[in-house]
Image (cartoon, rainbow, N blue to C red):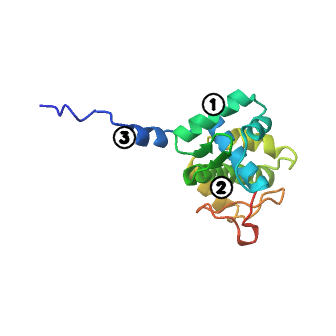
Amino acid sequence: MPDANRHRLTLSNYHEAVTKAPLSESIQDYLKAIYKLEDAGGGRVTITAVARDQGVSAASASAMLKKLGALGLLDHEPYHGARLSDAGRRVAIEVIRHHRLLELYLAETLGLDVDDVHDEADRLEHVISEELEARIDRALGFPTHDPHGDPIPDANLEWPAADRRAV
């Protein structure tokens, strides 16, 4: 006889399922942008700053910040700005790591001009697997900086020692 409670949805397992679902490119882009804005401004970021960075209306940015908050990726206090949660920060750093490894790989291995690698890396950063990321890292000799001189976090998402403030 099947267990009637086996497929029962609770708030706890719903939240777990949602937070483990793949994050959209848009969510990843917002997290990366908020991370960089936090770093540049030294703290909480405003909806206006996020909207400007992403090229969207304040209403669109506000809706996304609410979504990120519901996913546990952002802490937002109305009129006091937003700050990434630890989980949001980890996702942002992972996306930055993918981007910078891809830039270096495209420049060094495939010979793309350094001026052209950014846009390609923007497209690819969202879709590479962790296995491919590790292989690229290993093939490049575990680099610490991309072709523009920006630091690359390591596999543990730690910034190179000389570049703790890293974006």
Closer to the camera, 9 or 148?
A: 9
Disc 2 vs disc 1: Cβ atoms closer than 8 Å? no
Disc 1 vs disc 3: Cβ atoms closer than 8 Å? no
The residue sitting at the front extreme is 79
Q: Residue at x 68, y 41 (%)?
A: 79
Element on which disc 2 rests: helix
Q: Can residue 93 be seen in this view?
A: yes
Q: Which residue has dot 2 on it?
A: 136
Element on which disc 1 rests: helix
- What x and y, as percent, mark residue 65? 63, 37
- What x and y, as percent, mark residue 53? 78, 39
- What x and y, as percent, mark residue 75? 59, 46
Which amino acid does the dot numbered 2 rest on? Ile
- Label 3, residues with CA under 10 Å away: few <14, some 14-19, many ≥20: few
Q: Which residue has dot 1 on it?
A: 63
Q: Is residue 30 left or right of residue 90?
A: right
- What x and y, as percent, mark residue 102? 72, 50
- Label 2, residues with CA under 10 Å away: few <14, some 14-19, many ≥20: some
Task: Indicate whether 165 appears above or below 129.
Answer: below
Q: Where the C terminus falls, by quadrant? A: bottom right
Count the numbered circles shown.
3
Choose top left, top right, bottom left or bottom right for residue 6: top left
Q: Give the spatial CA distance, label 2 vs label 1.
A: 35 Å
Q: Give the spatial CA distance, label 2 vs label 3.
A: 35 Å
Which amino acid does the dot numbered 1 rest on? Ala
Q: Which residue has dot 3 on it?
A: 13
Q: Where the N terminus falls, by quadrant? A: top left
